[in-house]
Amino acid sequence: PMYFFLLNLSLLDLGTISTTVPKSMANSLWNTRAISYSACAAQVFLFLFLCSAEFSLLTVMAYDRFVAICRPLHYGTIMSSRACVKMAAPAWASGFLHALLHTANTFSIPLCQGNAVEQFFCEIPQILKLSCSESYLRELGVLIISGCSIFGCFIFIVVSYVQIFTAVLRIPSEQGRHKAFSMCLPHLAVVSLFISTGSFAHLKPPSLSSPALDLVVAVLYSVVPPAVNPLIYSMRNRELKDALRKVIQWVQGQRQ
C-alpha cells in the first residue's frame, strides 16, 4: 500500500511541476509574460486540483502509517488493494471538485483592474487583486469552506501521529522504535514541508507582501515541495544513501 500511495504522490508532484514551471521557462526564453485567458484558467484549475488531491492523499497516507504501526496484525486486511483504491479515488475526486469550484468562482468575477498578474503563474490571490472590491466576497466564502476542509485533514493527520508516536514509545526494542520512526519520518517531513510553505504563502501578514517576496514564496510552496518529495522518500533507499555519501566524500577530497 505504501508504494501504491507513493506512485499516486509522484504523479501529483510531476503534474504540479508541469503545470507551472514549463510555461514560466518558455516565457523566460521568449522574453514574454503573456498567457491566454483560457490557459490561465486551465493553470489555476490544474494547480488547485493537484495540490488539493496531494493534501488529501497525504491524509490517507497518515492513516496508512497509523494502521501499519498501531494495527499491524490487521494491516493486510484493512489496507487491501481494493481499500487502497477506494481511499485514493476520493483524494483525486475531492481535488477535482475543489479545483472546479474555485476556478469557476474565480473566473466568473469581472476583472476590472487590468490584466497583469504579479506572479510567475496564475494564482488565485493575485487574480482576485484585479477584481472589483465588492466582487471577491463569493470567493471568500469558498475559501472559508476550503479552509475548514483543510483544517479537518490537518487535525486528522495530527491525531494519527499522536497515536503513532504513543504506540512507538511503547515498543520495548530500540531497533523496533527506530524502524517505526523510519517508516513515518519521510511522510512527516513531506507533510511539514507542504503545510509550512503553503501556510506561509497564504497566511503571511499583508505588511510583508511585496512582488519580490511573493515570487520567492510562490516558488517555495509551488515548486520546492514537489521537487524535494522524491528525494525525501528516496533517502530510505540504502543505495541512494551510499551514493550520496560517496559524492560528499569526493567533494571533500577535491577541496583538500
Image (cartoon, rainbow, N blue to C red):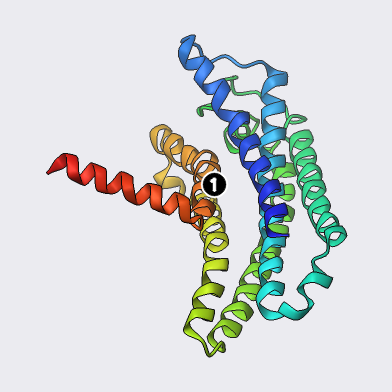
Which quadrant of the structure image shows residue 254? top left
Could you tell me residue 79's position as x and y percent? 79, 66
To which residue does mark 1 refer? 230
Could you tell me residue 71's position as x and y percent? 73, 79
For this rendering, which residue is in front, 249 or 109?
Answer: 249
Q: Quadrant of the N terminus?
A: bottom right
For this rendering, which residue is in front, 139 or 186?
Answer: 186
Could you tell me residue 2's position as x and y percent? 68, 59
For this rendering, which residue is in front, 92 or 219?
Answer: 92
Residue 184 falls left or right of residue 82: left
**169 in relation to 47, above or below:** below
**174 in relation to 142, above or below:** below
**128 in relation to 62, above or below:** above
**215 in relation to 90, above or below:** above
Q: Amino acid at mark 1?
A: Pro
Tally of numbered tags: 1
Residue 137 falls left or right of residue 25: right
Which residue is rendered at x = 67% and y = 28% of the image?
43
> How many residues crowd around disc 1 within 10 Å: few (fewer than 14), some, or many (20 or more)?
some
- Residue 204 visible to the viewer: no
For this rendering, which residue is in front, 174 or 52?
Answer: 174
Which residue is rendered at x = 51% and y = 58% of the image?
236
Which residue is rendered at x = 52% and y = 22% of the image?
24
- Residue 101 visible to the viewer: yes
Which residue ends up furthest to the top in the rendered image? 30
Q: Quadrant of the C terminus?
A: top left
Q: Secondary structure at mark 1?
A: helix
Which residue is rendered at x = 68% and y = 61% of the image?
61
Could you tell me residue 101's position as x and y percent? 79, 41
Residue 65 falls left or right of residue 165: right
Which residue ends up furthest to the left in the rendered image? 256
